[in-house]
Image (tube, rainbow, N blue to C red):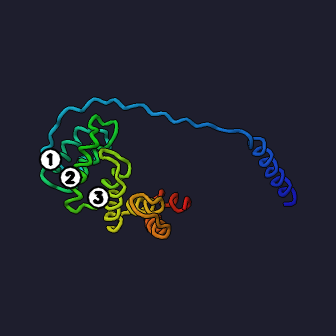
Amino acid sequence: MTRSLPVALCAALSCFSVSAAFADTSVTITATSSECKVSPPAEMTSNSPSIPAGVAAIRNRNFALARANFKPLAEKGDAEGQRSYGRLLMMKCTGLQDQAAGAEWFQKAADAGDAEAAAELGSAYMNGQGVTQDDAKAFALVSKAANAGLGGAQANLGYLYLSGRGVEGDPYQGMAWSVKAGEQGVPVALFNIAQA
């Protein structure tokens, strides 16, 4: 047992000396992105459109089948169909991306009382995706969704309060909403808390 202590101590000291050698080293990470150029998928129809079938189609990267399931439901006024179709239109590299139309479908679903659509539309307003960036509109929509208990919206609301976007900055409210989101397991909420 007395021999293991010096070995452990030597191992620890060698780690310190190695990390000291790299202390003056800088690392540059460059992220690049290229525009995704995917041609629009062929039109398809579904005899019995459903949300689960559309979600399965997205998992299988069959975006034409997803559209065939979501679009008819959205056009019939189904709020979940409108939200799902909006999400599909917001997705990149599907051949269907149309963020402005996606935001319109989110708006229709949010107007029908769909809290998830309100959260999605609030996020679109926060980031200027398909709509002109508008922090006041983002705050109103995200607040509605956060009050409905959606963790992602709670994290976004915490961020809006902490950063003073769309509302006067309020660190207490920012932390309170971030903690609520963190309790639901939303990882970005922990980032909000750490940065506050």
Alpha-carbon neighbours of circle 3 within 10 Å: few (<14), some, or many (≥20)?
Answer: many
Q: Are marks 3 and 2 in contact (CB under 8 Å)?
A: no
- Name which residue lies at 25% across and 32% down: 40
Q: Position of residue 135 (x, y in %)?
A: 37, 55
- Crowding around mark 1 (Cα neighbors within 10 Å: few <14, some 14 to 19, many 20+) is some
The numbered dot on residue 81 is 2
Q: Which residue is mark 3?
A: 118
Q: Which mark is residue 92?
A: none
Residue 92 in the image: state x and y as whole percent: 34, 39
Relative to 115, 8 lies left or right: right
For residue 3, which quarter of the picture?
bottom right
Q: Tell me the amino acid under the disc marked 2.
A: Gly
| Secondary structure type for disc 3 | helix
Dot placed on the residue nearer the N-terminal end, 3 or 1: 1
Query: Which residue is drawn at the image coordinates 26% and 48% (left, top)?
Result: 103
x and y percentages locating residue 107 in the rendered image: 23, 54
Please tell me which residue lies in front, 4 or 196: 196
User: Which amino acid lies under the numbered mark 1 shown in the image of this protein?
Assistant: Pro
